[in-house]
């Protein structure tokens, strides 16, 4: 009785709130239109009423024949707007003239302003079109005869049908690439050079590697579905984030040149993006199939990969400024079940002398799995507060999890403000009838924040503020379950019997999986490991081939529901509402979940980021989140989700880190040592070292798995201390790279070919990566290895030196070089021509490390020159305060340091190491003779120590001769 009274009360409030927005709801009810399910007869469009303006042109497009109504209703009248946004960026927007289709609001993603000058006659890119049938193509002004960057005249190309996803349901099996613009289906395709190099279009773990598979003759290489989905890191399927941006690296063998471009389709619609190479066509193509929205394209001219990524950043917003402490080592697990475990963990890290910057808690922290609470018995507020105060005193930090679903209260005496305030402040998503939409997550029946609603920011900020007052004095926030995840489908909680559903119980769950090649003799029995007579941790013959790619046309997964919407995107769960919110759930402003689903995470990130700016006035927020979308990087970093403690997943994490650099969310990393299943000593040893050279560095483990903190095994502790020390000494370099990301959109982590664009052997390298332009990482990715093969870019023109020994690598110019890689050793190399500012004394925390002196590492090329720079500020202010830019250059036996800016750097450079010099006879600093130097002829290494170089001086000069 009490329950129904509460629900009746809810409907009343929410119906009132709904009344003024109901008109937009009408496009939900499609009735029983019969669809042809075939685009072959779709008529395309004819262009008319073209009007040029200072910045581009506008024109009308009208349907060129009888509607085909393939998967919806053809829209008769479209408008095309072409805007030459800048020298390098061209915007082509095709929308329904009546403006009924969903368009991402400017408040959600700010778009570039109208240009202030005309680029129509000068921009790198040129828009070309045929009026009838309407088609457009984008060329480079500098090379109009070359194959266009984007070309929708593909209808005239020979083509083969894309195989059906499900042989018993032909609805996705159709031929031809006409422009289709329907209310529930949009299609556009573009030709690509045969076999070109495509990157991006995620979030995905691609079996093809970082470089996407565009198919060989007659084949579909990739069907990339964009539909945010809570799923434990599957291969070749849609997952947490949606990023409709690709980078094309186009290499011309004849001229031995490369030029890169990028294409963004700024849409939140559920989509299939297909890469294929039709039979006998000698052309590859990209086809977009979307279940809503408009065609909102941005084209980026590059011509380098780095420039394409930066131009994308300029369009959707550069990544947020990271606080320096965020680069420290983070430790988490699901299963730190009480405050004593947190305390013991922090102490054990200290005792093992393994730097710990941030202690995290998963949902164990919560009372009854409810967000913004602490369990009164296991995490009493006062003890938690003391614990966090102690961390703060030691310059360490604390980060708790925030789940997106807000548990519904069970009865009238149940007090839970985040829910009850959400109801009264009207901040939750609704059912189509205006009643509260309820799904089901860890706390049981749960409501979901409506990020569009007017009071949501105030409510969310207050919930976070209240939490700090309960003792949860966090330094940053971890956003999870924000696809949004729901454990039942459709409006499962609405009207349900609440007493029948309690919060989930996970106590007693035990992880039984182990890494490939797990050695029971060495590490002890691994529990239940036999399935159908085969050990689940047996050593595969080819470790990297064990996970098979989803078959094309496997139409998918058995549960695919092809009834609604009419075109079934290839969602790994089948029906679009599975394991997430019902797609007919409604948002403030009349938006339906179907249209805005892919933006839930990004809007939560924006709201949380702004809340943290309110809570920590003047300080940079720190966030890590699971579901992302274009512009998420403005608000958050990302972890690569619920991976597995497998060698395979350690390798796959590299392409994830590289992808998110393209997506402008550079603060990214994987759950180190693996999340699902048990890890083992060898895998954790290698992974703690690998992840130390990726931006976000967190060891995180699942409930019921063997503990995997780095102090659990001596070898892992040792490997971690080594790798973390290297990471912390490189902090000024990382920090400079991230300042470049936040001010210019340049990616801190780079695929090798970004720096060496005409070496095709690098185009699919995803077992190695570059930090900036100067540090090459070559990790071990297989069990039992004592060596690793790596490629050294530059084909013999670059001198690569070992980070640890400074020895020159005897690199094979034509292929892989085999490197020694015993356990606890990771291969890291320094490029020549580089100068790195380093922390000389990596310490226990980032704060203590930053307090210490600097050193400089100069790696000269064969001509004896090198360059470098560094950005230095206080590491925490937002907006960033004063800074200092240091420019380093070396040539002819002289190192110059030029310093500009207002930020005073108290620390001095105490050591300068110069690699690649002949035996000197003397060293001077600003003309004064320096005595304290040593020279090692074998490494051609000059070490000048006991210096005190003032970095605030406008210029310093160090000479050797
Ligand atoms: C699509 O329609 C065309 C023309 O009516 C027909 O030839 C073709 O077989 C159809 N394709 C499918 C997959 O139904
Ligand atoms: C490569 O460059 C040559 C010479 O400019 C040109 O003829 C050819 O079409 C180019 N190839 C491709 C695939 O663009
Ligand atoms: C109301 O819900 C709370 C919280 O779950 C529970 O502890 C309490 O027993 C419930 N009261 C009644 C009367 O059911
Ligand atoms: C915050 O705490 C105050 C005081 O307990 C309470 O009145 C308010 O409802 C809380 N707000 C939220 C959003 O939890």
Image (spheres, grey):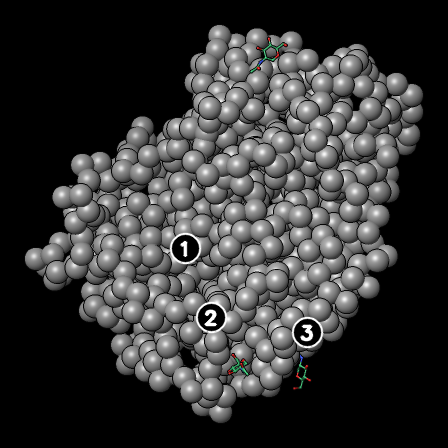
Q: Are marks 1 and 2 in contact (CB under 8 Å)?
A: no
Q: In terms of sequence position, does the residue under pointer 2 or pointer 3 come before the other?
A: 3
The secondary element bearing badge 3 is classed as: helix
Q: In terms of sequence position, does the residue under pointer 3 or pointer 1 come before the other?
A: 3
Residue drawn at x 28%, y 35% is 545
3 or 1: mark nearer the eye: 3
Left or right: 531 with respect to 930? Answer: left
In the rendered view of the protein, which quadrant contains the N terminus?
bottom right
In the rendered view of the protein, which quadrant contains the C terminus?
bottom left
The secondary element bearing badge 1 is classed as: loop
Q: Position of residue 431 (x, y in %)?
A: 69, 55
Residue 779 in sight? yes
Q: Are marks 2 and 3 in contact (CB under 8 Å)?
A: no
The disc at residue 5 is: 3
- Callout 1 crowding tier (Cα within 10 Å): few <14, some 14–19, many ≥20: many
Question: Residue 371's quadrant in the figure?
Answer: bottom right
Residue drawn at x 21%, y 68% is 713
Residue drawn at x 67%, y 48% is 584
The disc at residue 642 is: 1
Left or right: 785 with respect to 320? Answer: left
Residue at disc 2, CB closer than 8 Å to ligand 3: no
Q: Position of residue 650 (x, y in %)?
A: 33, 49
Question: Residue 258's quadrant in the figure?
Answer: top right
Q: Mark 3 and mark 1: span between their CA atoms?
A: 40 Å
Residue 858 in sight? no
Foreground pick, 567 / 727: 567
Q: Mark 2 and mark 3: span between their CA atoms?
A: 20 Å
- Callout 3 crowding tier (Cα within 10 Å): few <14, some 14–19, many ≥20: few
Foreground pick, 653 / 799: 653
Q: Mark 1 and mark 2: span between their CA atoms?
A: 24 Å
């Amino acid at each position: 009785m009490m329950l129904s009274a509460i629900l009746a009360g809810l409907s009343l409030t929410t119906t009132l709130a709904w009344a003024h927005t109901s008109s937009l709801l009408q496009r939900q009810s499609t009735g029983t239109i019969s669809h042809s399910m075939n685009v072959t007869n779709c008529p395309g469009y004819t262009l008319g009423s073209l009007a040029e303006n200072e910045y581009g042109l506008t024109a009308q497009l009208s349907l060129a024949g009888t509607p085909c109504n393939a998967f919806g209703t053809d829209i008769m009248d479209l408008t095309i707007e072409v805007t030459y946004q800048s020298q390098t960026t061209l915007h082509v927007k095709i929308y329904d003239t009546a403006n009924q289709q969903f368009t991402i609001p400017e408040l959600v993603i700010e778009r570039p302003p109208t240009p202030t000058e005309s680029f129509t006659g000068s921009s790198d890119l040129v828009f070309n079109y045929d009026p009838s049938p309407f088609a457009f193509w984008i060329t480079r002004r500098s090379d109009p005869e070359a194959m266009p960057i984007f070309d929708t005249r593909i209808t005239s190309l020979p083509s083969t049908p894309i195989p059906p996803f499900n042989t018993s349901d032909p609805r996705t099996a159709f031929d031809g690439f006409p422009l289709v613009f329907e209310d529930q289906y949009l299609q556009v395709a573009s030709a690509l050079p045969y076999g070109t190099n495509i990157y991006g279009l995620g979030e995905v773990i691609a079996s093809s590697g970082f470089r996407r598979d565009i198919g060989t003759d007659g084949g579909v290489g990739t069907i990339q579905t964009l539909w945010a989905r809570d799923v434990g890191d599957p291969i070749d399927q849609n997952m947490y984030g949606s990023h409709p941006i690709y980078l094309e690296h186009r290499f011309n063998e004849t001229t031995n040149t490369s030029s890169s471009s990028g294409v963004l389709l700024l849409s939140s619609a559920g989509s299939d993006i297909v890469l294929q190479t039709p039979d006998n066509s000698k052309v590859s193509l990209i086809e977009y199939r979307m279940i809503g929205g408009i065609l909102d394209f941005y084209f980026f001219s590059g011509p380098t990969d780095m420039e394409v990524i930066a131009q994308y950043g300029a369009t959707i917003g550069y990544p947020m400024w990271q606080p320096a402490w965020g680069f420290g080592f983070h430790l988490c697990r699901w299963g730190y079940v009480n405050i004593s475990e947190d305390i013991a963990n922090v102490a054990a890290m200290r005792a093992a002398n393994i730097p710990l910057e941030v202690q995290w808690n998963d949902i164990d922290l919560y009372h009854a799995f409810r967000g913004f609470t602490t369990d009164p018995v296991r995490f009493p507020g006062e003890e938690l507060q003391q614990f966090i105060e102690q961390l703060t005193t030691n310059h360490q930090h604390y980060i708790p999890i925030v789940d997106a679903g807000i548990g519904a209260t069970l009865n009238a005496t149940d007090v839970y403000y985040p829910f009850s305030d959400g109801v009264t402040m009207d901040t939750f998503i609704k059912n189509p009838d205006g009643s509260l939409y309820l799904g089901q997550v860890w706390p049981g029946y749960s409501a979901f924040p409506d990020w569009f609603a007017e009071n949501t920011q105030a409510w969310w900020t207050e919930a976070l503020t209240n939490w700090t007052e309960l003792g949860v004095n966090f330094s940053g926030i971890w956003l999870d379950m924000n696809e949004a995840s729901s454990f039942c489908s459709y409006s499962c909680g609405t009207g349900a019997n609440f007493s029948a559903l309690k919060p989930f119980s996970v106590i007693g769950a035990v992880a039984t999986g182990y890494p490939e090649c797990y050695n029971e003799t060495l590490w002890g029995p691994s529990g239940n490991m036999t399935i159908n007579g085969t050990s689940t941790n047996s050593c595969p013959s080819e470790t990297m081939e064990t996970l098979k790619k989803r078959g094309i046309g496997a139409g998918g997964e058995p549960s695919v529901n092809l009834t609604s919407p009419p075109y079934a995107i290839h969602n790994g769960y089948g029906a679009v509402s599975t394991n997430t919110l019902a797609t007919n759930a409604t948002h403030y402003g009349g938006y339906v979940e179907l249209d805005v689903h892919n933006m839930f995470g990004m809007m939560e990130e924006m709201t949380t980021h702004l809340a943290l700016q309110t809570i920590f006035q003047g300080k940079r927020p720190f966030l890590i989140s699971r579901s992302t979308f274009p512009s998420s990087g403005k608000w958050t970093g990302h972890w690569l989700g619920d991976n597995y403690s497998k060698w395979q997943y350690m390798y796959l994490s590299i392409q994830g880190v590289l992808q998110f650099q393209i997506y402008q969310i550079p603060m990214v990393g994987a759950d180190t040592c693996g999340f699902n299943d048990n890890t083992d000593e060898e895998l954790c040893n290698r992974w703690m070292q690998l992840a130390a050279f990726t931006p976000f560095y967190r060891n995180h483990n699942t409930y019921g798995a063997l503990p995997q903190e780095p102090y659990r095994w001596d070898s892992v502790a040792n490997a971690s201390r080594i790798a973390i020390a290297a990471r912390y000494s490189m902090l000024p370099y990382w920090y400079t790279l991230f300042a470049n990301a936040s001010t210019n959109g340049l990616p801190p982590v780079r695929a090798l070919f970004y720096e060496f664009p005409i070496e095709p052997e690098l185009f699919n390298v995803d077992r190695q990566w570059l930090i900036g332009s100067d540090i090459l990482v070559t990790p071990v990715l297989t069990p039992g290895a004592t060596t690793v093969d790596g490629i050294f870019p530059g084909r013999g023109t670059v001198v690569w030196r070992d980070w640890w020994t400074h020895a020159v690598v005897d690199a094979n110019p034509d292929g892989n070089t085999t490197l020694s890689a015993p356990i606890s050793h990771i291969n890291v190399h320094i490029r020549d021509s580089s100068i790195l500012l380093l922390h000389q004394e990596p310490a226990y925390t980032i704060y203590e490390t930053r307090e210490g002196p600097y050193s400089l590492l100069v790696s000269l090329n064969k001509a004896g020159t090198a360059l470098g720079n560094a950005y230095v500020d206080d590491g925490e202010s937002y907006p960033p305060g004063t800074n200092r830019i240091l420019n380093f250059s070396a040539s002819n036996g002289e190192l110059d340091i030029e310093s500009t800016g207002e930020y005073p750097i108290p620390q001095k450079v105490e050591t300068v190491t110069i690699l690649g010099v002949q035996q000197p006879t003397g060293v001077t600093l600003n003309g004064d003779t320096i005595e304290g130097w040593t020279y090692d002829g074998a490494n051609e290494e000059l070490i000048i120590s006991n210096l005190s170089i003032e970095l605030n001086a406008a210029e310093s000069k160090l000479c050797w001769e």
